[in-house]
Image (cartoon, rainbow, N blue to C red):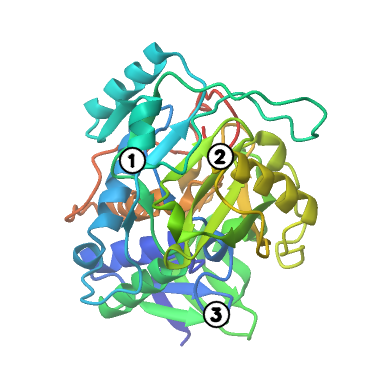
Amino acid sequence: MGETADVVVVGGGIVGASIGYQLARRSDLRVVVLEKGIGPAEGSTGSSSAVSRCRYTHRDVVRLALHGQRAYREWPAFTGLADPASRYVRTGVVWLFDEEPGKVDADVARLAAEGVAAAAVTPEQLAERWPALSPCVEPLDLTGEVDHECRPFERVLVEEDGGYADPAGANADLLEAFRREGGDLRLRARVTGVRREGGRVTGVDLADGDGIDAGLVVNAAGPWCNQLSALAGASVRWTLHPTRIQVGYRDWDPALGDLPTAAEISSGTYFRLDAGGARVLFGSILPEDEEELVADPDDYNRAADASFRDVKVHGLHHRVPGLAYRGEVTGIAGLYTINREDVHPVVGPTDVEGFWVANGFSGHGFKLAPMIGSLVARAITGVEAEYDTDVPTTLFALDRQPFQVQTKAVLA
């Protein structure tokens, strides 16, 4: 007789680990998480910037991000681990955009209504808190052909509780908590087939020749999601593209003081401190930097392009004028799985009975992961648990209409 499980979660990254943990902690279901790598965070999670912010266009997504942030801030209690590998670093998130004061004030009120600690600050207030930052919002001509004259903002929005966590550590923590609750984690377990009978899923086949019988399979395979959905014969009408995303690193000078997490419009860059404050991590918020499609998620360039590093570090130096032009600039590339219709995930059952998806996170996966696990587990088991979100389980359903967003990019 073959091996059996109640639920098989395919993908052991931050989303799959969260789903597995939430299922195991609230039920007696036999749950198996299958990860094709030799350890956690080998896919999109490992290259995540792991920023936690709540300024989204849609109310329910604001709430989902806020509830995820609460989980990260209270990580030992959320995971039940006395000494977790990840810890939350509360830096504040500054939105250095050229926005009308009325727009900033309205967004502060909108976020505050959902429980987000937000404030509108002036250039003088910004300088008091983070003196290293320039208040300029004039677009920066990165070609060097046009002389730049700085122009300060009037007011910008600050999320007081925003910050970041350790993506690989958080992934490992969730898997440890999953196993503590009785879950079964399998590494080096690549799925090569999805079993079906009578129009419904009955299990999975593995590359080593083994298989698992199961009445429910959850596709949390990140950039490999389309391959798995095809194996199941599921029709997922959303366009989910594995997309190469780059980030860079350079040394930080502690004499410049503290640095918030920030998104800034003059060069289209975001940044935060990294490695315990020893360096700065920086990347792009521009749609044009989210266009490089990857045909095979197992085979792509994982190093950042020199041209990307050079352009973005120039923007960083403009934002932090006192940062000396010295030290090595390095970088990596990872993958977002971008939903090209509305840059939001699709989560829930498909047209194949017993086959669920949690895919297309478009750069929001780490922020939302703790509560995606909550949504999926609550829908499957009907059981509520501590830290659950009150956002409807159908928020990202496959049959929903695309969300209306201002930009089809990571800041949607």
Residue found at x 30% / y 37%: 63
Report x, y in % for residue 254. Answer: 44, 60
Type of the residue with mark 3: Gly
Please tell me how crowded label 2 is: few (under 14), some (14-19), or many (20+) other residues with Cα within 10 Å. Answer: many
Q: Separation of disc 2 and disc 3 at Cα? A: 53 Å
Determine whether, in the image, residue 319 is placed left or right of residue 373: right
Image label count: 3
Residue identified by numbered label 3: 211
Q: Please, what secondary structure does the residue beneath circle 3 have?
A: strand
Type of the residue with mark 2: Arg
Please tell me how crowded label 3 is: few (under 14), some (14-19), or many (20+) other residues with Cα within 10 Å. Answer: many
Residue identified by numbered label 1: 129
Sequence-first tag of 3 and 1: 1
Report x, y in % for residue 98. Answer: 52, 21
Residue identified by numbered label 2: 319
Sequence-first tag of 2 and 3: 3
Q: Please, what secondary structure does the residue beneath circle 2 have?
A: helix
Give the number of the disc on residue 399.
none
Please tell me how crowded label 1 is: few (under 14), some (14-19), or many (20+) other residues with Cα within 10 Å. Answer: few
Residue 106 to residue 227: above or below = above
**Who is closer to the viewer here, 114 or 269?**
269
Report x, y in % for residue 21. Answer: 32, 66
